[in-house]
Image (cartoon, grey):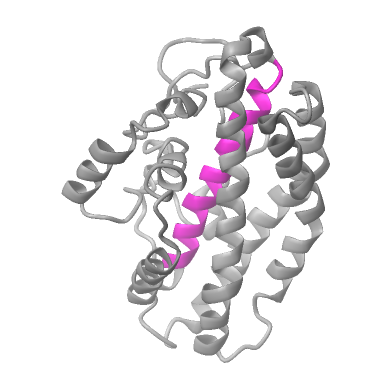
Amino acid sequence: MASAEGNSSRPWADGPFELIPIALLGYKPGEKVEPYHAMGLEMVTVHNCLIRGINSIYLQCINVERSSASIPAFIKYASVWGRVLSLHHTTEEKWIFPEIEEITGERGIMDASVQQHHAFEEGVKAYTDYLKNADIGEEKYDGAKLKTIIDSFMPSLRQHLQDEILTLKGFDKYKDKTDWAKWTKDTIAKVVKKTQTADGMVVELPFGVHNHDVEYEQIGSWPPVPAIVFFIIKFLYFGKNSDWWQFAPCDKNGKARDLPYSL
């Protein structure tokens, strides 16, 4: 837990499922990324938010049972991870991947990623269904059961999150097809506009920010919004579900912190 505050010996959210280093794209920490790797960098950042999120859930799902009053909020926090993962893969398949095919002229270039989505969807559905049942009281919350469900799908999901970055790394061969940095910026803005909901500001975005370690390999600021706008968003929206974010590995400024119920 080298990046978290304090000297706690308890595990932090950089494991057990490994984060994706910027070296996978071919760069050193802090090194400027070429325009054709702009989407690859965005995906490294988002994928690591997902990995930190599931790690924080995995590490705390059993010990949170020591505080029965905290379990309902923990279930909400863990449920948001499933929502964010689903939204991420839906936007990839609906908007991002088709545009990549069109720009590169390579039909099926992202098909391997889509196929991998299907490989772990049954396990993720079991995860979301169990949490839904626990949330509404149809099943008693059992941290050991949740951990077993995560073990059933995370190895294949973690492999997918890495493999997709390797696919995007190969975009150097298409570097003259478009202004990739502009395309990435415009595409992200378009996706946000098309998928933004009333819950987005108080659920999905805070989850991402609370799972983004700003100091990790100095990858850069995220999410890609002007600082003043981001400040206002945090002030207006991030406090609504603050009891959920207590289980997250970072504060609302992306600073790593101890996990209250880690093993």
Q: Nearer the viewer, residue 140 or 154?
A: 140
Relative side of 5 to 57, left or right: left
Q: Quadrant of the C terminus?
A: top right
Image quarter of residue 81: top right
Decide: is 202 above or below 116.
above
Image quarter of residue 77: top right
Magenta-colored span: 38-62
Relative side of 212 to 69, left or right: left
**Rendered location of residue 238, percent (x, y):** 34, 36
Image quarter of residue 64: top right
Q: Residue furthest bottom?
A: 105
Q: Nearer the viewer, residue 69 or 3?
A: 69
Which residue is found at the position 38% from the left and 71% from the top? 190
Q: Is residue 145 visible?
A: yes
Decide: is 41 above or below 254.
below
Q: Nearer the viewer, residue 234 or 217?
A: 234
Query: Disc count in the image?
Result: 0
**Rendered location of residue 50, percent (x, y):** 57, 45
Decide: is 97 above or below 212.
below
**Rendered location of residue 21, percent (x, y):** 54, 46
Which residue is found at the position 66% from the left and 31% from the top? 135
Relative side of 102 to 193, left or right: right
Q: Is 43 in the magenta?
A: yes
Which residue is found at the position 61% from the left and 34% from the top? 78
Relative side of 70 to 142, left or right: left
**Rendered location of residue 51, percent (x, y):** 59, 41
Decide: is 163 above or below 191.
above
Q: Nearer the viewer, residue 4 or 81?
A: 81
Q: Is 198 in the magenta?
A: no
- Name the chief secondary structure element in magenta: helix
Which residue is found at the position 57% from the left and 74% from the top? 94
